[in-house]
Amino acid sequence: MVRVAIAIALLLVFAPAARADTFSLQHYHSGALDAEAQGDVTFPDAGGAVVNVTVSDRNEDGWCGDAWVRSNLPPATHKLFQVCGVAKQQTFTVTLPATARCNITFVEVQVGRVDPSNGDKTELGEVKRMDHACPPPPQPAPPPPPQKVDSGVSFNWSANRRWTLNTRLSVRDVPAGASVELRCRGRGCPGKRKVVSVKSGRADVHRVLRHRRLRPGARLELWVTRADMIGKVVRFHIRRGHTPSWQVLCLPPGTASPARC
């Protein structure tokens, strides 16, 4: 649970913030500045857009300073903001609806002026289009790698040229929920597979092999496994006149055969 909480916290810290674009637009008439539109557009990652626009009327000529806000949404959603009166300005905010993530692909703002006394005659000035390339959604943190079974295995053997006897084979620190199994192939084996009971994190495997005369060429594998962990497999090769050679292998979750760690 602690790892899950950390992963969620990292997602919140590194999730992409809403992207903002700024604009500063002017309209000139006969070389004189008579209308301005300044502000910013924010594109939240969840969708929609927020437009803040300050419109200024800079010339006392009966015309009004105007700003048009358009987007990829239908024309019915487009906005016109107007300020009339020299040196007068006003800030407007419009929120475009978030119907889906990144549903607003662009916002366009244009400045101009309109003459209300002359049939709303319009002169258009500078325009800026702010495109919103949809960023990829934040990816969840990868799950932590599975832990390894780190149980200790102790053993002892008595060997001659004809057979090998086990005198000790035990497992300690078996994880809760893990199983211990002895697999054997060759002459003298007690069976192909034997599940060994675990008590208080310990398993006595020797009791399965007691008095068994394992012949040269036989192979034993001691499996300590749990579904969500990398299992531990200890493999023994019975040799003539020598104690068995052995190696430790790993069994990743979902695999059927052990391999080198």
Image (cartoon, grey):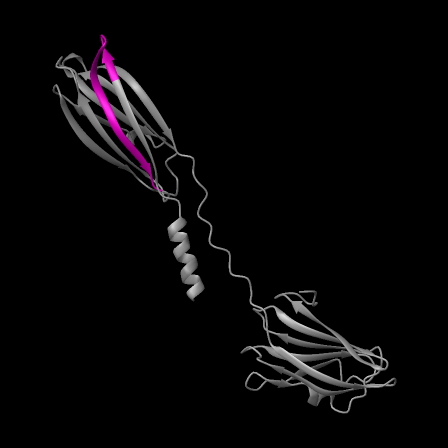
- Residue 30 in percent (x, y) is at 22, 7
Please report the residue visible at 32 percent of the width from the left and 21 percent of the height from the top: 127
Figure check: 21 above or below 117? below
Q: Quadrant of residue 113?
A: top left
Figure check: 129 above or below 16? above
Please report the residue visible at 25 percent of the width from the left and 27 percent of the height from the top: 38
In the displayed orientation, state which residue is furthest to the bottom.
211
Please report the residue visible at 31 percent of the width from the left and 37 percent of the height from the top: 42
Quadrant of the snapshot with the N terminus: bottom left
- Residue 244 in percent (x, y) is at 78, 79
Q: Main secondary structure of the magenta part?
A: strand
Kindly tell me whether residue 197 is visible in this rendering.
Answer: no
Quadrant of the snapshot with the C terminus: bottom right
Kindly tell me whether residue 146 is visible in this rendering.
Answer: yes
In the displayed orientation, state which residue is furthest to the top.
30
- Residue 155 in percent (x, y) is at 70, 83
Figure check: 153 above or below 91? below
Left or right: 4, with 164 as reference point? left
